[in-house]
Amino acid sequence: RWFEYVLAAVVIAVPIATLTVQRSLSSLTEDQIHEQAHKLGSNILVLPSETELADFYGFLYGTPAMPDSYSQKLGTSSLRQQIGFIQSRLYANVDLQQVPLIVVGQESTVQGRTRPPPPPGAAYLGETALNRLGLEKDDKLEINDQEWTVAGLIRRPPDGLDIALYASLET
């Protein structure tokens, strides 16, 4: 009779253990998928509808811009929980001393920023841009009749834009 009791216990315990392990793995996998989706979602790029993606990724920025009402639209969309993490940027192509550069204006009030934005009238430069222009920290440069100060060097610039000059969006 003891054999029947042990066999019944095993028959009951094995499916319960199997279901418990399966549920644990399922939960773990679900958490990993959620985390990965969150990471991938943090790199969503929202561009004006007139922008050609090939031009954008070829660093050819034209005149298209987002209407000011987009921040309100995004605030009422399904992205409203992540709205504090959205970073507004303006891109422009400029030639400075016969050197083609990209100016990137970044919003200064973004959560999770790794470096503080430069003060008004100042800019960080990617290493290639700094070398091509022959500039150093605190040097002055002029863009569109506006004087800028080199605030420093960015060794690993966002989006690989090593030929960019980064300023606050307000500037």
Image (cartoon, helix red, strand yellow):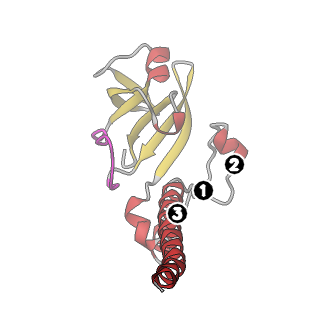
Where is mark 1, residue-wise?
Answer: 47
Which residue is most to the front? Answer: 1
Q: Is residue 13 visible?
A: yes
Depth check, front residue: 23 or 140? 23
Mark 2 residue type: Leu
For image coordinates 52% across by 67% down, the residue present is 30
Taking 20 as reference, is 165 above or below it?
above
In front of the other: 117 or 86: 86
Q: Residue under circle 2?
A: 53
Q: Magenta segment, principal secondary structure?
A: loop
Q: What element carries label 2?
A: helix
Instruction: Report crowding for label 3: few under 14, some 14 to 19, many 20 or more residues within 10 A (C-alpha).
Output: few
Disc 3 residue type? Thr
- Given residues 74 and 41, the one toward you in this image is 41
Mark 2 crowd level (few <14, some 14–19, many ≥20, 10 Å Cα): few
Q: What residue type is labelled 1?
A: Leu
Quarter holding residue 54: top right
Q: Give the range drawn in magenta.
A: 109-120
Above or below, 130 against 64 in this view is above
The answer to whether mark 2 and mark 1 are in CB contact below 8 A is yes
Q: Mark 3 points at which residue?
A: 29
